[in-house]
Image (cartoon, rainbow, N blue to C red):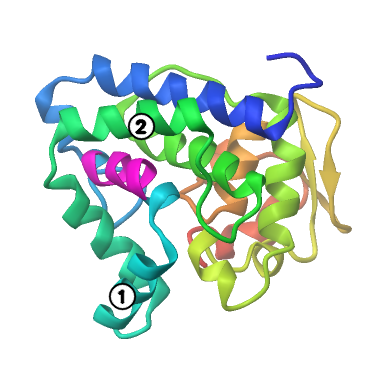
Amino acid sequence: MKGSATAPELTRAHRQGFIETLKSLDPEQWWAPSLCSQWRVIDVAAHLAWAPVMGAGAGAAAMVRHGFSMNRMIARSAVAWSERGRDAILAQLRENARTGATPIGMPPVAALADAVVHGLDVRRPLGLPGAVPVEALAPLADFTLGTPWPLNAVVGGSARRRVAGVRLVATDTDWTHGTGPDVLASAEVLLLLLYGRPVTPADLSGPGVDTLVPRLGRG
């Protein structure tokens, strides 16, 4: 994608790429664990298929069923949706890519975050190739860093607290955030860090790593 690509254009490209990834998986890989602790690959795919098209009424009813816990509602809904099977999931994902569907009440960048970060949730544990477009780093970082409590619970926890006191520096694009000793990493690793996904000290470099290490894996 060109550097001037818009969020909807990046989202469409990642959704289409995710569909191609899923089509390439064997049945065992569909049932493999993802980076999301409660979800298998098929659950991640089901979430990306139906979360963008859940209406307000269905969302409210699901919240009631799950005790008004947003995290519990999201986690359990995806597992329930996965029972519809691979063909239905792929068909809905294609429809979302065609229409540009976005979760109700959320900005376009939320759909981009889902497409990119959940793509990593599937690709990395399966050892699949791919790349995060560097132009996606800034808007996705701004989105999660600017999401307040309690809404940040659905984007990996408090990214701002997790990276406080260090300066994040992307090694593959012109992007920095924060003040303090530097922590250097690729755009992909920085997104994993900001969205509360597993990152190891080996993924990072710079004098700020020791400050950050105790927080890795925390929300």
Which residue is at 25% across, 14% downward?
Answer: 24
Q: Residue 91, image x and y in percent? A: 27, 28
Q: Is residue 213 visible from the viewing direction of this image?
A: yes
Q: Amino acid at mark 1?
A: Ala
Kind of element beneath mark 2: helix
Magenta region? 42-50
Q: Residue 217, image x and y in percent? A: 48, 59
Q: Residues within 10 Å of mark 1 (few under 14, many from 20)?
A: few
Main SS category, magenta section? helix
Q: Residue 112, image x and y in percent? A: 59, 39
Q: Residues within 10 Å of mark 2 (few under 14, many from 20)?
A: many
Say which quadrant the N terminus sits in: top right
Mark 1, residue position: 61
Mark 2, residue position: 93
Q: Is residue 66 above or below residue 153?
A: below
Q: Is residue 166 above or below residue 61?
A: above
